[in-house]
Image (cartoon, helix red, strand yellow):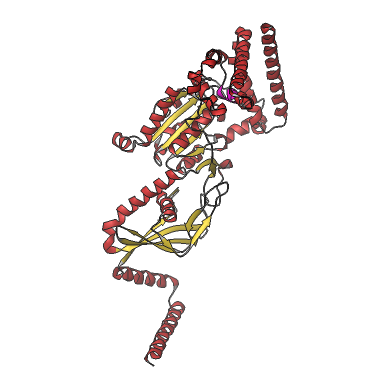
Amino acid sequence: MKEVWTFGSVASLLGALAFFQSVLHSVLPHELRHVVAKFVQRIFNNFSAYCYFDITEIDGVSTNELYGAVQLYLSSSASVSASRLSLSRPVNSSSFTFGLSNNDRLVDSFAGITAIWEHVVTQRSSPSFSWRSLPDEKRSFTLCIRKKDKPLILHRYLDHIMEVAADIRRRNQDRLLYTNSRCGSMDARGYPWESVPFKHPSTFDTLAMDPIRKKDIIADLRRFAAGKSFYQKTGRAWKRGYLLYGPPGTGKSSMIAAMANFLGYDIYDLELTEVQTNSELRKLLMKTTSKSIIVIEDIDCSVSLTTRGSPPHPAANPPPHSMDDIFTSPASAAVSTKSVTLSGLLNFTDGLWSCCGSEKIFVFTTNHVEKLDPALLRSGRMDMHIHMSYCSFPALKILMWNYLGISEDELENGKENDILIRELEAAVEAAEITPADVSEVLIKSRRYEKRKAMEELLAVLKGKAAARRCGGAAGASLGSKEADEEEEQEKRALDSPKEENSEDFEQICDKKQGKKTELEGQSLENEE
């Protein structure tokens, strides 16, 4: 009977409170109710034994790095327990991802102290005006600990979360390859970068390059990754720049992939032609994460970043014949819309905005380093210049191991191959062939047994060397000036969406094929 009376008393009390609350809502205005609620909440917080910390997904204009670390820690730590977890598998990914469901909570422990986490997801109220798009949902984590435990574990606990999240990222084999959205558009969550899993298999072991030079690059990367205290002590931003230059097909993209796989960094492939202003360029930099490689490939062909003293090419920007041409000319329209300047790019790599985040690597690639402004190449922006040259004999041995399975011991100890090896060494130096061309030959020859494949490679190398000798001064000139001009014309034809440029591209291909056939015919006549 006592239990029934107690239950009835509680029900009566709840009913009275509900009636009192409805009276307050009908009598008191909204502003006064808000003040009363804040006052009651403050009194409750003073008498409460717990304190709360909100970790939002977006902090101002940039992504909160702590939010991502907490999300990764809670989804992978074995010490957590939750009643409900979300399970997902990203596109083109081989692993499943666990996460805390919306508005769910779990309990974690650190140093014998209990911490309660809650994932809070609410709908964002759309403002009347906003200078940038924001995601529809507002996401945050709320940490609840006892007030008496706050001085004991808060900083140590958060440092522990950051370290565990960093270790998980390093162990995770799935890297991400980002590219900036077209014309600076944002995705549904307000990010200007689009990503796909990075699965490039290139490593420093498979990279066709001189081993001594390769060891220098690996040692420099290791010093950079372990140099946090050094950069803080010297007052320098924790970043480094690498310039990769050389002919096409010498492995510049493979070098970038090998660097990313070696360090475990994500890659941001920045397409400058899609960036409209210097301000947009800075926003893209702010949205990159730490432990990343920011890449601009073929920087000499992206935008007008040539030496400041050199005049523009007359064919690129023809002078208008009248005032109407200024507004109707496609070239003038392109110049007016593309306003990324050399100064903006310099500030992007070595200005105040380059210090946003830490542990970042900038990599620029070019086929013509002489076309770049010296200010872009100095130390502090491009700290290490790496010349990606033609295939050397040490690089050739790496390629033969990659494609044919011929180890260096077999080459050095196989007496029956001594003459063949010496001929290969002499032919590859005389041919000036790129590693990409050698790889194509080895792919076609891998169906043969090892010695037969090596003989096929030697024949191709001798043919290349003979073609260079037969060309003489004309061949050398074609390999330098005319080849460079044809390459630039080919890139412009490929990049241009106009239909009339397709005929120019076909003419370029026919011209190159005709010269190639002529040189091969001369080499065959000389051999006969």
Quadrant for the N terminus in the image: bottom left
Say which of 467 and 419 sits in front.
Answer: 419
Q: Is residue 266 left or right of residue 35?
A: right
Magenta span has 470?
no
State whether residue 307 appears in this view: no
Residue located 51% across and 40% down the image: 280
Image x and y of residue 286, in percent: 45, 43
Say which of 8 and 250 sits in front.
Answer: 250
Image x and y of residue 133, in percent: 53, 51
Q: Say which quarter of the image contains residue 213.
A: top left
Question: What stretch of residues is rendered in magenta?
Answer: 434-439
Quadrant for the C terminus in the image: top right
- Dominant secondary structure, magenta: helix
State whether residue 217 appears in this view: yes
Say which of 16 and 387 sits in front.
Answer: 387
- Residue lying farthest to the bottom in this orientation: 1
As drawn, 64 above or below 4: above
